[in-house]
Amino acid sequence: MLKGLFNIVVKEVKELVRDPKILLGMIIVPLIMFPLMGFAIQTSMEAVEETMGKLALGIMDQDHQSGVENLTAFLNALDVPTVIIEKPDLATAITYVAQSNLTGLIVVPPGFSQNLTETRKARLTVYTVFRGGGIAESSSSSVISSLLQTFEASLVTQKVSQAIPDDDPSVVLDPIEMSEQSIVGGIGVNVRPDVFFGVMMSQSTGMPIGIMMLLIFSMQLAATSVASEKEEKTLETLLTMPVSRFTILAGKLTGSILVAVVGAIAYIVGFSFYTSSLTGFMPNAGVDLAALGLAPTPLSLILLGVSLFLSLLSALALAISISIFAEDVRGAQALVGPLSIILVFPMIFTMFTNIYTLPLPLMILLLAIPFTHPMLAANAAFSGNYLTTLLGIAYVAGFTVIVLYIAARMFGTEKILTTKLKLRRFRLRRSN
């Protein structure tokens, strides 16, 4: 029944790889684009760190009291260089700071020290120099604000110490010490929830993205394969070969799967480099997911593979069935393109929430989309929820059988050749 399948698969792979749009868009671009993005982010973060090391502030003293000396001493103790700006007016001081290598200007108004002494609200005006934008300058503004907030906290601590000399100021200001831990699988774990969920997100976020990319690329490949042969008039010749229509369909599906897997690997490799450039600046949380029973097991990976394969097979068959109604490659891509919505939609929800906690109509809608289930299986691989994965596999298998039957029926009749003629006649009637 599948005589000649290998030759059909080889033919499909060669034709797809020869297409420069596929080679460039699916393999070369992701291998270059993502590493370049990661390199740009990494370089920017290093530039920010270097800029923070060169942070220097100008102080315009309009108060001429002890409060300014305390502020200057506090900043110098934190290794932040300060320069007293002695200019006749604010405009001249701003011009001087803008032309210098200073990061910002702190203006201390008259009465600043007296307000602090008499426990009234004291004000400071802070100017951050804008020299062209970028992450470094936005970070500079945040760092200056943090420094002044720390100075404010030190003044509060000093006030409390004077008012209650026998008590520890830190206890008065922060009387409760909270220890945050997590419950995982019914067991208490000495890991803060924010750290734990951050690590889990870094482990599971990439899987739905990779699955979505794999499905989208595979559908585009399958649709292009049929439409290009219709456009180049080679489909008629292929259908007259001494092989069954089902073998041709199986060959196209298999060839598209092989090329799509290579493209998906290229995207995952590039995307992994990109995410590593971000996580490289995050402290190691030291969370052992395997010890907590949250690492993928061989069984969970096998179930994930089965779910992904069935979804991939149904997506390819669906794309081939739809592409029959297109006259050329551009038309096939236009018909298949909107299907990406039903891939992006579940990806967003599975990345950011548990869909079983959503309102019932929305949850039913998501579960009705067959491509939601491999994404759920990817998340379940970390929690060991095999029942959810098995139910999803059963649903996707049923959907795949239906789509394959439709695709096989179309390939088994002359509709694959006559559909274009019918559409053309319909257009002629409309034009008349």
Image (spheres, rainbow, N blue to C red):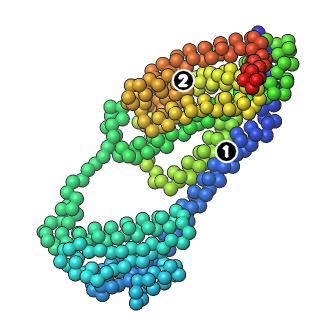
Measuring from the top left, give residue 387's x and y in whole percent: 45, 21
| Mark 2 neighbour class, 10 Å CA radius: few under 14, some 14 to 19, many 20 or more | many
Label ID, residue 30: 1
Residue position marked by numbered label 2 in the rendering: 370
Picture mark count: 2
Q: Quadrant of the N terminus?
A: top right
- Give amino acid for label 1: Pro
Q: Nearer the viewer, residue 391 or 326?
A: 326
Question: In the figure, is residue 347 to the left or right of 147?
Answer: right
Up-down relation of residue 132 to residue 322 (above or below): below
Mark pair 1, 2: CA separation: 27 Å
Point out the tag, 1 or 2, that comes first from the N-terminus: 1
Up-down relation of residue 239 to residue 141 (above or below): above
Measuring from the top left, give residue 6's x and y in whole percent: 79, 20
Q: Residue at x 29, y 70 (%)?
A: 152
Q: Residue at x 63, y 25 (%)?
A: 315
Up-down relation of residue 34 to residue 235 (above or below): below
Question: In the figure, is residue 48 to the left or right of 194?
Answer: right
Mark nearer the viewer, 1 or 2: 2
Q: Is residue 140 visible?
A: yes
Q: Residue at x 68, y 16 (%)?
A: 407
Residue 397 occupies quadrant? top right
Q: Quadrant of the C terminus?
A: top right
Q: Is residue 298 visible?
A: no
Measuring from the top left, give residue 12's x and y in whole percent: 79, 27
Up-down relation of residue 316 to residue 192 (above or below): above
